[in-house]
Image (tube, rainbow, N blue to C red):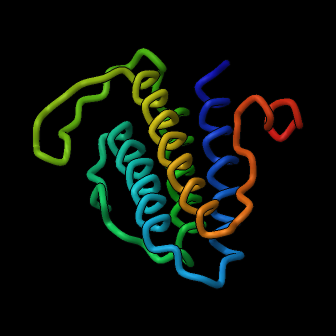
Amino acid sequence: MTEKEIIDYTKVADQYIIAIFNQSTVAQPEAARLFSHVLNAQHIWGKRMLGLRPLYGVWELHSQEDFNKISEENFKLIYLALSETTSDQVTYYHNSKGIRYENRVDEILLHLSNHSTYHRGQVVTLLKKAGFEPPVTDYIILKRDQLL
């Protein structure tokens, strides 16, 4: 599996969750807060891999109406980072507390995907409790159904 395939999966799975938010006529503030965090983290890591300063804070809240636009912008950043870096290239960055770190691009991409999956699971749990039938976003099912 390539880094691009990992990011493609993350993008498709996110789009399924965004679709549920778009269909909802009832506010889901905790789910929206968690998904905003997912989008913020993707943005932050995309910017870091490109050596740019992030525009969003880790827990910045976004309007559900903006989820799709932000997601599209994030994946443009991430795909650009994929095209301009190598998987073993080291990225130097500062975390939200100002501490300097370094990681390889492949490590960052794996973290980005795992982090997104973790929080999508939390969002799905909240949506189920609210009566929604969230889509299946398991990698292997999306792959089996040729959606990746």
Location of the N terminus (image quadrant): top right
Q: Which residue lies furthest to the bottom in this view?
A: 25
In this image, 17 relative to 107: left or right? right
Residue at left offset 56%, top offset 51%: 76
Q: Where is residue 22 in the image (x, y as percent from the top left)?
A: 67, 74
The one nearer the camera, 28 or 39, is 28
**Circle count:** 0
Residue at left offset 39%, top offset 56%: 37
Location of the C terminus (image quadrant): top right
Q: Which residue lies furthest to the right in this view?
A: 145
Residue at left offset 56%, top offset 78%: 65
The one nearer the camera, 35 or 41, is 35
Residue at left offset 30%, top offset 28%: 91
Q: Position of residue 16 (x, y in %)?
A: 70, 56
In this image, 117 relative to 13: left or right? left
Q: Position of residue 72 (x, y in %)?
A: 59, 59
Q: Where is residue 86 in the image (x, y as percent from the top left)?
A: 47, 21
With respect to residue 59, does 7 lie above or below?
above
The one nearer the camera, 126 or 146, is 126
The one nearer the camera, 44 or 115, is 115
Q: Residue furthest left?
A: 98
In this image, 81 relative to 55: left or right? right
In this image, 90 relative to 140: left or right? left
With respect to residue 91, does 12 lie above or below?
below
